[in-house]
Image: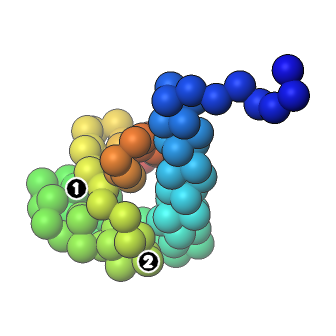
Amino acid sequence: MSGPLRSPYTDVFGLSARECLSLYADLQKVLAAISSSPRYAFQIRKNAELSNTKEVRRLIRQSGLVSPFDVAYTPDGINITILKDHGHLTASLRW
């Protein structure tokens, strides 16, 4: 074979991998903000404890996150899922 093997399946797979790479940059912003600011981390946790999802989302967006995302939390921690059309990336953080 003279060239790489290509198919529609690997094209979508490659696109998914590229999209997830871009998600890492967004996720890094959120994780850097949480890890570097105890006050910011406290605000997110406090609002999660109060089931104030709107404020939790606002705070996460404040970190510089530009991609669409979902957030879910439990008494044990928070899951932040950053979304793209062909993939997603989830950070599961314990309180």
The residue located at (43%, 77%) in the rendering is: 64
**x and y percentages locating residue 8 in the rendered image:** 49, 30
Along the polypeptide, which appears first: circle 2 or circle 1? 1
**x and y percentages locating residue 49 in the rendered image:** 20, 53
Whether tag 2 and tag 1 are in contact, CB under 8 A, the answer is: no
Q: Name the residue under label 2.
A: 64
**x and y percentages locating residue 80 in the rendered image:** 37, 50
**37 relative to 16, above or below:** below
Callout 2: 10 Å neighbours few (<14), some, many (20+)?
some
| Front-lying residue, 80 or 66 | 66
As drawn, which residue projects farthest toward the front?
A: 2
Callout 1: 10 Å neighbours few (<14), some, many (20+)?
many
The residue located at (38%, 72%) in the rendering is: 66
Q: Is residue 46 left or right of residue 19?
A: left
SS of the residue under disc 1 = helix
Count of all numbered marks drawn on residues in the image:
2
**18 relative to 22, above or below:** above
- Does residue 42 appear in the picture of this structure? no
Amino acid at circle 2: Gly
Amino acid at circle 1: Ala
Q: Mark 1 points at which residue?
A: 48
The residue located at (26%, 51%) in the rendering is: 70
| Front-lying residue, 3 or 74 | 3
